[in-house]
Image (cartoon, rainbow, N blue to C red):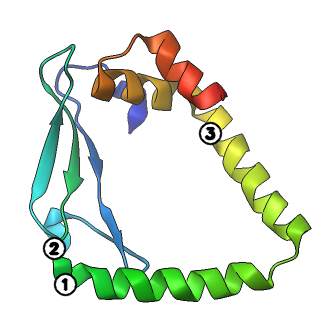
Amino acid sequence: MLTTILEPTTVVTAPALIGGEWVGPDDGGGPALDRTGPYVRRTVSRASTTDPADAAPVGAYARAAARRIRRLSPAARADILDRAARLAVERRDDVARLIALELGKPLKDGRGELDR
């Protein structure tokens, strides 16, 4: 998905996570909101919107997840964060390009966001 982000016709789509389910405009979610890159002046990403009715299932899901995470040992939590960091490193250039396009930053600054 992100490997072709610099192609003029590529738009990255981001669904909304509602109650543990990824919901896009085609899945009954709210209308899509386009993000125009300030440097390229074209749509670079599209995110699903939500409405106030989505707050209850989002809150319930977050509370249930917090209870599960709270029961994990510190080492188990660290393993989860380590895995997330590895995945970010694996996709570093693709994510950095998206950050750069969405925010109008140089690519090196997009990489810097990930390297912090």
Residue, disc 1: 53
Q: 49 and 91: which one is in front?
A: 49
Residue beneath disc 2: 51
Name the one closer to the observer, 109 or 30.
109
Circle 3 or circle 2, nearest the eye: 2
- Whether residue 47 is situated above or below residue 1 in the rendered picture: below
Task: Give the mark nearest the N terminus, 3 or 2.
Answer: 2
Query: Tag 2, which secondary structure?
Result: loop
Q: Is the Cβ of the residue at disc 3 closer than 8 Å to that at disc 2? A: no
Check the picture and name the quadrant holding the N terminus. Answer: top left
Q: Residue at x 55, y 20 (%)?
A: 111
Identity, as a three-letter code, of the amino acid under mark 3: Ala
In the picture, measured across the screen, residue 73 lies left or right of residue 95, that is right
What amino acid does circle 1 point to?
Ala
Q: In the rendered image of this protein, does residue 68 appear above or below residue 80? A: below
**On the picture, is 76 further left or further right than 38?**
right
**Vertical comparison of 62 with 41: above or below:** below
Of labels 3 and 1, earlier in sequence is 1
